[in-house]
Image (cartoon, rainbow, N blue to C red):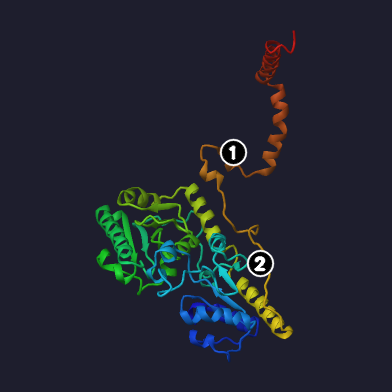
Amino acid sequence: MEFYGDLIERLESELAAECRAVSPAELMSDSLRADLVVLNDETWPFTGASLPGLHRRAIPTLHLADGILEWRNTWENPQRASQERGMPLFQPVLADKIACLGRSQARHLESWGNIGKCEITGSPRLDGILRRPVGLHRTEGPIRILITTARSPGFTQQQVDSVRASLRDLADWFDNAGSSYEPVWRVAPEVDEAVSGGNTMESASLSDQLQTADAMISCPSTVQLEGMKAGIPVALLDYGNRPAFVSAAWSITATDHIDEIVPALANPTPERMSFQDLLLYDSLECRTPATPRVVTLANAMVESGQKSRADGTELRFERCILPDTSDEAGGPTHQRASMHPNHPVFAETNVAALQAEVGHLPRAMRLSPTQTLYRVLCRVEARMLRVRKGIWR
């Protein structure tokens, strides 16, 4: 129940909901009575087998996505290699609706046959991450780089070994970098021997670390989005070089990249940070808090279920219950002044003066001897071109 956090409190206070936890096996019981079932995992056999039956009984089901889609988990996880071991992930989504982290995640899911099931909500779990002000950097002490992995660093021994090798290369680089950098390791216990101790995954709060880190290097994980949302530069660490369902503005896919990327993270350019924001807002709906959107979605699904059961009709939902929020304020920003320092006009903020200047420019151009001569020459050249083409004889 901890995963659902504040969402339960909001459901209880705003919808007068009575929330309780049930085991996956209980979902298959015909005696189950509910207005809505919320889950975050369809891979359990009892869960996957129960969802179609709940739909037939007009009990709505909402899958609340816990983390990002990841290539290895989707296509290379041995648990999905055959029907005897497990079914393909999200192909299809069996719940009536899935609350997606962001637009890119919804596009991937829809490409796997889930049209009409994807609702873009963001993640209630990430609502509490505070974004640091733009341009805020510590002025003293070493550059603090947070290095993270997912709790499951891989799904095969080869994948785990690849993560371990990348961490070992990073540890060696920091050992040789001197006192200018301070690595903070937050990695899965399965691979922490690569970083020579000091692993903080079980001992420190990620939210606290995000507020004190200057940058992040992360293996494919939802932590990528948490770092981006906090406003620090994030590099994707992936020696396997798999397609990234969540991309990053910086990438480390080989040892040779470390020497270039780590200093770049310490001094991120405005254009890279702008691109990171674009990736963030495509991958995570975070213009406004996610929890109210999930509550609105849950309420609409509850009402649809109650009506279907009362009328004895099939449970149906609109293709998109939630409105599109892509035009709302709070999205990516494009700071032209900092991106183009050699174009001082972008730094001008006096709108009235700029308007007056633009108003004077047409007359100034007409009165300029250089512009007058230029216009005459253009007319002469145009006349000569017509003569050469035989238009005038």
User: Left or right: where does residue 375 sit relative to residue 158?
Assistant: right
Q: Residue at x 34, y 49 (%)?
A: 257
Labelled disc at residue 327: none
Earlier in the chain: of badge 2 and badge 1, it is: 2
Residue 86 is drawn in which quadrant? bottom left
Name the one closer to the observer, 98 or 49: 49
Labelled disc at residue 320: 2
Q: Locate the C terminus and report the quarter of the image it occupies.
A: top right
> In the displayed structure, would residue 56 be above or below residue 130?
below
Name the one closer to the observer, 339 or 100: 100
Residue 123 is drawn in which quadrant? bottom right
> In the displayed structure, would residue 25 be above or below residue 320?
below
Percent across and percent down for residue 192 are 29, 68
| Residue where numbered disc 1 is placed | 345
Q: Does residue 59 appear anywhere in the picture?
A: no
Q: Secondary structure at mark 1?
A: helix
CA distance separating discs 2 and 1: 43 Å
Percent across and percent down for residue 347 are 57, 43
